[in-house]
Structures are given as C-alpha cells and as structure tokens.
Image (cartoon, rainbow, N blue to C red):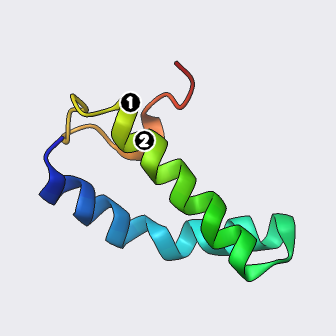
Amino acid sequence: MTSAQFETLFSQWYAPLCRVAYRMVRDKDAAEDLVQEVFVKYWERNRDFNADEHPKAYPTCT
C-alpha cells in the first residue's frame, strides 16, 4: 500500500469510524484517538496490502 492509497483510505473511513467509536466510548477525543491508533497499526502491519481488496474484507487480526 502506498502512502497515497493509505491517505485515500484514511480520508474515506476516518469520520465514519470516529462516529462508531464515539457511540462506544461517548467521548469525542477518546474516539478520535482510538481511530488514529487503528490507522497507525493498520499502516504498520499492512504496507503490502493489496489496494484492490475491499478494506472491510481484510482481516484485522494477525
């Protein structure tokens, strides 16, 4: 996964994931922190991610 592809993924999914996280933790800052942590881990673990795959189908546990 290139940094441009990651940026696109982040732009598309950051806000929706923040909304989901907020419903779980009921704290805006905490929700944003959680989502940012998820994206950092995703970037670190999936540099070889196939951009043609749909992100929802990609396994989250390694």
Q: Position of residue 54 (x, y in %)?
A: 34, 43
What is the three-letter code of the residue carrying label 2?
Answer: Tyr
What is the three-letter code of the residue carrying label 1?
Answer: Arg
Work out which quarter of the rendered image holds the N terminus and state it. Answer: top left
Q: Where is residue 43 in the image (x, y as percent from the top left)?
A: 35, 43
- Mark 2 closeness class: few <14, some 14–19, many ≥20 residues within 10 Å: some
| Circle 2/circle 1 CB separation < 8 Å | yes
Name the secondary structure under disc 2.
helix
| 47 to the left or right of 4 | right
Q: Which mark is residue 42?
A: 2
| 2 to the left or right of 26 | left
Location of mark 1 (residue): 45
| 13 to the left or right of 61 | left
Above or below 6: residue 11: below
**Residue displayed at 47% across by 69% down:** 14
Q: From this viewpoint, which residue is outermost toward the bottom? A: 28
Displayed quadrant of residue 55: top left
Could you tell me how far apart the alpha carbons at marks 2 and 1 are, in whole angstroms? 5 Å
Name the secondary structure under disc 1.
helix
| 16 to the left or right of 50 | right
- Nearest the viewer among 54 and 50 is 50
